[in-house]
Amino acid sequence: MTRSPAPAAVLSVFLLTVAIWGTTFLFIAIGNDTVPPVWAATLRLALAGAILFTVMAVRRLPFPRGAGFIAAALYGFFQFGINFPLLYLSEKRAPSGLAAVVFATIPLSTVFFARWFGLERLSARRIAGAVIVAGGIALMYSSQTGAAARPLELAELLLATWAACLGSVALKRGPHQSPIATNAVGILVGAPTCLIWTLVLREPLALPASFAAVFPIVYLAVAGSVGAFVLYSWMVGYVELSRLSYIAVIVPIAAVSLGAWVRHERLGWATLAGAAVVMVGVVVGISHPRAQASAVSSSSKASTG
């Protein structure tokens, strides 16, 4: 039986993950200034994969097999092969802070996907939260017609969040395994998928040479794909998905602030109002009465061993 980690350890990993992902939206936008978006995602995954497989070799970690391999491969396909290209493409025009706000809908989407696959229960509170979030997204859409981010970019962001949710659900349904091996297999599937996107989009395949082009890719590979994604996949084994998804609620605060400070991004009042509505809906949807939360949390721990 797998022993659960101390609450303080889980909280520390949670906060570190938030800190890393709070900067990734900004670095994606910076990288898009010099490198074609999906090609940048492909290079990021290639570098991250090389690091992870090296760590696996040094630590002699077993390669996932059977149900573990299938779960990790599906996780990689949706999380890296679908989510990444859509996110990178959208940030060619959408402000990085806005991208982070749309990603804050992941908690409720995760709840509904998890319910669909029988992992969690659906309640009236979660349905109410989804309705509020839908209203916030509609307000953001209406405010972005002809603005810095068009409805097309917002649609790409929403589709990216749903792909990320499917990746998390696939990982949750699989057996508990090493997060390093999980992400290595995920990248083994996700990187070639990104390359296919790159070829279809006919992006130039030149290797970046300047510091401005290389640094965002290196940072996102090391801190994002190796650091945060490994930490996140480790937490998936011990924390209820809807609780874990609070990350998406906290990250936009850092992302919007950094976007305004570094890139001078400005979101209109209607967009900010829609973002606030989204946040309220997410908090409503993933909050539980204490007794219910305890029961669901216990069920989740039992299912993961």
Image: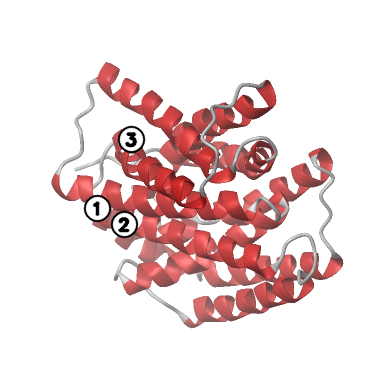
Confirm or deny contact between disc 1 and disc 2 (CB under 8 A). Answer: yes
Q: How is the image coloured?
A: secondary structure
Residue at which label 1 appears: 174
Decide: is 269 above or below 59.
Answer: below
Labelled disc at residue 170: 2
Q: Quadrant of residue 140?
A: bottom right
- N-term mark: 3 or 2: 2
Residue shown at 54% from the left, 27% from the top? 207
- Depth check, mark 3 against mark 2: the one in front is 3
Residue 141 location (% of width, % of height) = 70, 73
- Depth check, mark 3 against mark 1: the one in front is 3
Q: Quadrant of residue 99?
A: bottom right
Residue 214 location (% of width, % of height) = 60, 25
For the N terminus, the quadrant is: top left
Q: What's the CA distance linking mark 1 and mark 2?
A: 7 Å
Decide: is 145 above or below 17.
Answer: below
